[in-house]
Structure formats: C-alpha cells, structure tokens
Image (tube, rainbow, N blue to C red):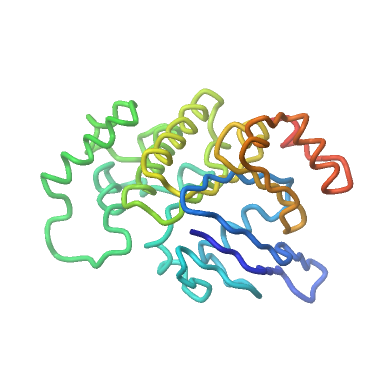
Amino acid sequence: MLQLRNIHKTFNPNSVNEKHALQGLNLHLNAGDFATVIGGNGAGKSTMLNAISGVWPIDEGQILIDGADVTKLPEFKRATYLGRVFQDPMLGTATNMEIQENLALALRRGKKRTLRWGITHQERSQYRELLKTLDLGLEDRLTSKVGLLSGGQRQALTLLMATLTKPKLLLLDEHTAALDPKTAAKVLELSDRIIAENNLTALMVTHNMRDAITHGNRLIMLKDGQIILDIAGEEKKNLTVENLLAKFAVAAGEELANDRMLLS
C-alpha cells in the first residue's frame, strides 16, 4: 500500500544550517499494516510524513501509494489517497464552521464541488450515526461550532473526518501528544477501532514508547533519517520498553538520550 524508495530530503542545503533529514529512507507497508513510528527529536519522523503528504518535494527517491507514483503530485492532489490527523487539534478542523459542515467537507475530499445544497437530510442522519460511535455526545451537537469543542473532542472529530472516505493510507502525527492522559487513551482507543473496522493501512508517529509497543502490528524506529529497527509479529507482541531500549542501543551503537521519549 505504501512504498518509499531511497527517499532523501535536505533542508537549508549548502548553508551552516544544512540538515539531511532523510537519508535514503526505504519503507514498504502492506495493505492493513498499522505501523507505529518512534525516534528521538530530529530522527525524521514528521519529515517522513510530510514527504508522504507532499507538503514539500523530496530531493531524491520515489513514493508510491497503492501502486500509484505520487512523487510529483502536489499536496492537494494526494488528498484522495490520504487521511491525516495532526498533533495540534486546531489543525484538522475549521473552527468557525459547524460540526456537520466539517464532516461535509471531509465527505467531499477529492471530489468535484457542485451548487447543490451542502448537507442533505440523508447526510445529516449519517453524520449523527457516525458521531454516536465516538460516544462523546456530539451527535446532538451537529450545528455547534467546532471551536466550542474540547481538544479531545476535536481530535476525535478530526480522526472521524480523516477516515470518512476510506483513505489508502492514514497518517497519525503524534495525534495524542497535546491531550491529557485520559483523553489521549480514549483517542488511541478510537484510532485502534476505526483502523481495525475499516481495515486501514496506517502510520502513527509517537514519542511514547509504551504506545508504540501496544498499538499496531509493526514498530519502526528512526535515527538520523534512516530506519534502524523494524519489529513485527511475535517479536513485537513480546516487546517491552526495556527490550526496546536495549535493541536501540545495539542498532544505533549508543544509549537513547531523549528526555521526551524516556519520560513518556
């Protein structure tokens, strides 16, 4: 479902601030894979997601989604392939629009617009049923402005919007990092359920080693723009934080020294 072939990306080339963020990155995800991605600051996690999304062009390499070469496609043309949930709950929704209007925009992602009524009665019923599955009481607040929702409610809504039209690939970019622990656990539970029910292929970036171990069927660790660990199957099921730290030390040739990862 996703192939990254020899991806290179350098920021500020030929300057004192030059940063080779991705260094020949290769990754292959099969349909239905749910891979968690972990690594220290500057490892290349968000850079990888931005490369897949087309936020900026890569310097070298090839990106294929479900067999289609999207390497040269601009960000808006990749919208039909991708769903994405950002770390900041403010980024995934239109604050001054109603909940039902946000869902209507998501339903029409990648489709041609017309001059028909924006939301039909049938769609309104569909949105209400979908919102019930979140168990947050939002099904009775269809006309509420999204800006009135809590961070957790907005992130749950964004997750629903990102998967409303089944994407080829779902990108979760530290989507629980800005939430309190209880709300984060709820959003992760929703993520697991939505991915499983729709048999989605997903990449979830996180700084939390326990979350990376608990969720998904593969765990990928990045360092200096390259994959140094790719753990799946029984090995991942039996993994502990201590094992992961030990494997990192062997693969990287050094101890992990990242406060954010260790404290989480």
* Residue at 77%, 29% in the rendered image: 242
> Which residue is at 29% across, 54% downward?
105
Residue plotted at (79% across, 76% down): 14
**Residue lying at the far top of the rendered structure:** 182
Query: Quarter of the image containing the C terminus?
Result: top right
Residue 114 found in image quarter: bottom left
Decide which of 10, 249 is in the foreground and name it. Answer: 249
Residue 177 as seen in the image, left or right of residue 130: right
Above or below — where is 73 with respect to 113? below
Residue nearest the observer in this picture, 235 or 153 = 235
For residue 259, side relative to residue 214 (left or right)? right
Q: Is residue 159 left or right of residue 125?
A: right
**Front-lying residue, 259 or 122:** 122
List x then y, in percent, for residue 138: 29, 31
Residue 47, above or below 150: below
Pinpoint residue 45: horizontal percent, then vertical percent: 65, 52
Residue 26 visible in image: yes
Q: Position of residue 69 (x, y in %)?
A: 49, 73
Residue 127 occupies which quadrant of the picture? top left
On screen, residue 126 versus residue 163, left or right, reads: left
Residue that appears at 53% across and 73% down:
71
Say whether residue 42 is visible: no
Q: Quadrant of residue 142?
A: top left
